[in-house]
Image (tube, grey):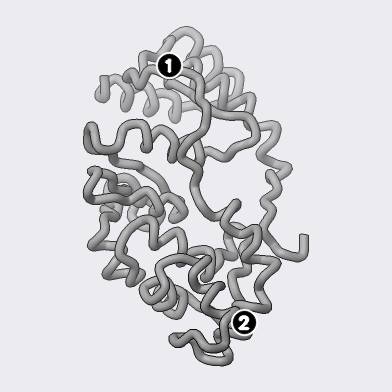
Amino acid sequence: DTTGTTEDTPADLVPQVPVIVELLAALGIARVGAAGYEADDVIGTLVERTAGRRPVEVVTGDRDLFQLVDDARGVRVLYTARGGVRDADVVDEAFLTQKYRVADGTAYGQMSILRGDTSDGLPGVAGIGEKTAADLIERFGTVEAVRVAAADPSSPGLTPARRRRIVEAADYLDVAGDVVLVRRGLELPAAEPLLPIPDAAAFAAFADEVGLGTTADRVLAALTVTT
């Protein structure tokens, strides 16, 4: 795909999925999904259902979910990629403003389309880095508004070079939003957000089958403390 906007499932991951499903069942951890959609979209939908009614914290190592940050509705992200769960970054609107120069989660998503993300196979707009992308979203509000301005030579706020780069990135920008932006309105099966209640016998059999060793003991100990 010349636009760089498709994501392929790693071949090594495919055989792991049924093993993960079996593990979650043995540990009594609720699992919910939607065929054809990523976990980000499922999380986004669950957050959308809850935000504003109670505080929501999304624990993740994926920056894409910074889009969900919304101080007014009590949504923040605990970002574990750098410090792990014990020392997670608390991502709220102040964090986004300080680190990325964007006002909120919605602006972060728009900035991400322009910037791209090589870890997700997204090239971004050539010559538009994170700082420039944030400046453009601060000025114009949305990627679509940036594109409208770029297409109008009389519109102020864009240098000739940036105008040209945005126009030349039309194929990428036509589809990038479908990959970058987290969906919020999926039809999901009902799932009760209950605390995990492990099936000790099933988990012991699973742990023995896959050779978890002492890791299994640590998992059960952690869940016992939690519950």
Question: Distance from label 1 to label 2 (Cα)?
Answer: 51 Å
Could you tell me which residue is drawn at 59 percent across and 70 percent down? Answer: 124
220 with respect to 178 (left or right):
left
Which of the image's four quarters has the C terminus?
top left
Residue 36 coordinates in the image, percent (x, y): 65, 35
Picture quadrant of residue 52: top left
The answer to whether the residues at label 1 and label 2 have Cβ atoms under 8 Å apart is no
Q: In this view of the protein, which residue sits in the foreground, 9 or 143?
A: 143
Q: Nearer the viewer, residue 95 or 48?
A: 48
The quarter of the picture where the N terminus appears is bottom right
Name of the residue lying farthest toward the bottom: 160
Q: Residue at x 66, y 73 (%)?
A: 169
Residue type at tag 1: Gly
Give x and y (percent) for residue 123. 63, 68
Residue drawn 40% across and 68% down? 141
Question: For mark 1, does the 10 Å Cα neighbourhood hold few (<14), some (14 to 19), or many (20 or more) residues?
Answer: some
Of the image marks 1 and 2, the number of the one nearer the N terminus? 1
Q: Give the numbered dot on residue 20.
A: none
Q: Estimate the x, y position of residue 187 in percent, counting from the top left.
A: 52, 27
Q: Amino acid at mark 2?
A: Arg
Instruction: Tell us which disc is closer to us: 1 or 2.
Output: 2
Front-most of residues 24 and 47: 47
Task: Give above or below for 9 relative to 170.
Answer: above
Horizontal side, residue 184 vs residue 224: left or right: right
Determine which of the numbered discs, if any, sits on residue 165 in the image. Answer: 2
For image coordinates 59% across by 65% down, the residue present is 118
Asked which quadrant contains residue 157, the reply is bottom left
Residue located beneath label 1 in the image: 28
